[in-house]
Amino acid sequence: MNYTLKNVPERTKKPRVSGYTMAMDKGLSLREVEDFVSVAGDYVDVVKLGWATSFVTPRLEEKIAIYHQANIPVYFGGTLFEAFVVRNQFDDYRRILSFAEVSDGSIELSHEHKLDYIRNLSEQVTVLSEVGSKDAAKILPPYKWIELMQAELDAGAWKVIGEAREGGNVGLFRSSGEVRSGLVEEILTKIPFERIIWEAPQKEQQVWFIKLLGANVNVGNIAPNEVIPLETIRLGLRGDTFTHFLDENKQTS
């Protein structure tokens, strides 16, 4: 930090279990990746190469190498997993992994089969599993979110991801981007908050989760140019949370 300020929330240090920031790379150039990690590398815990963008990204191995040199793991979006699975190429998929996301947002996959994939992959790599549909018309009741999340954690997922897409307008959120607050609060009665990454690409969504769960909530699908702004929100150094942590300190002092 460049200054000394009192009453700033304590942030967890890398490698973190909570306070995780997952950034979304949707096609950055090599130069952009170098610039990104030079500025925000300390605040990024993992980078997702969105959906199946890695299939068409030029100089992919060089891009991944830049992230790895900055000690930032990289994984491919769950849609790429689905693209391999639907083509009966799961073994081919396994050969390209160091980290995996298992999802079923675009294909029909029984949950038992999804759990089998999680169990299989978790023997090889760290697995993130995504819960929730990319179809805005498919609304899962809270008990179902809890049931799916717990089963996937039990199958070997390191963390579960609450689906929101890159736009933040499905799954955890209404089409307007508003948080389905009752859903989130009910999930948290059963699933520990440090085991969940909430996809929250919009600033208002990030603010909501930080106010609910504190500076060290796990959030994902963060645009590269929003990682530094997110960190200021976590620390109460942006207008949206400026008084939130000061008020908390007053109550405990």
Image: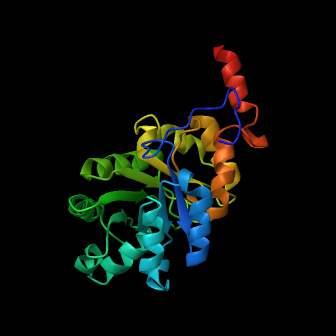
Quick one: which residue is furthest to the right in this view? 239
Q: Is residue 176 above or below residue 251?
A: below
Identify which residue is drawn at 51% across, 43% down.
19
Residue 33 falls in image quadrant: bottom right
Could you tell me if residue 168 is visible in this image?
A: no
**Quarter occupied by the N terminus:** top right
Identify which residue is drawn at 46% across, 39% down.
193
Identify which residue is drawn at 62% across, 63% down.
224
- In the picture, measured across the screen, residue 63 lies left or right of residue 233, that is left
Quick one: which residue is furthest to the top in this view? 253
Colouring method of the image = rainbow
Question: Front-most of 71 and 108?
Answer: 71
Residue 116 location, x and y as percent? 22, 62
Q: Is residue 86 above or below residue 74?
A: below
Residue 240 location, x and y as percent? 75, 42
Residue 232 falls in image quadrant: top right
How many labels, in total?
A: 0
Residue 72 falls in image quadrant: bottom left
Q: Is residue 182 above or below residue 77?
A: above
Question: Front-most of 11 and 250?
Answer: 11
**Quarter occupied by the C terminus:** top right
Question: Front-most of 59 and 227?
Answer: 59
Residue 123 location, x and y as percent? 20, 59
Residue 103 location, x and y as percent? 39, 65
Could you tell me if residue 15 is visible in this image?
A: yes
- In the picture, measured across the screen, residue 206 lies left or right of residue 110, that is right
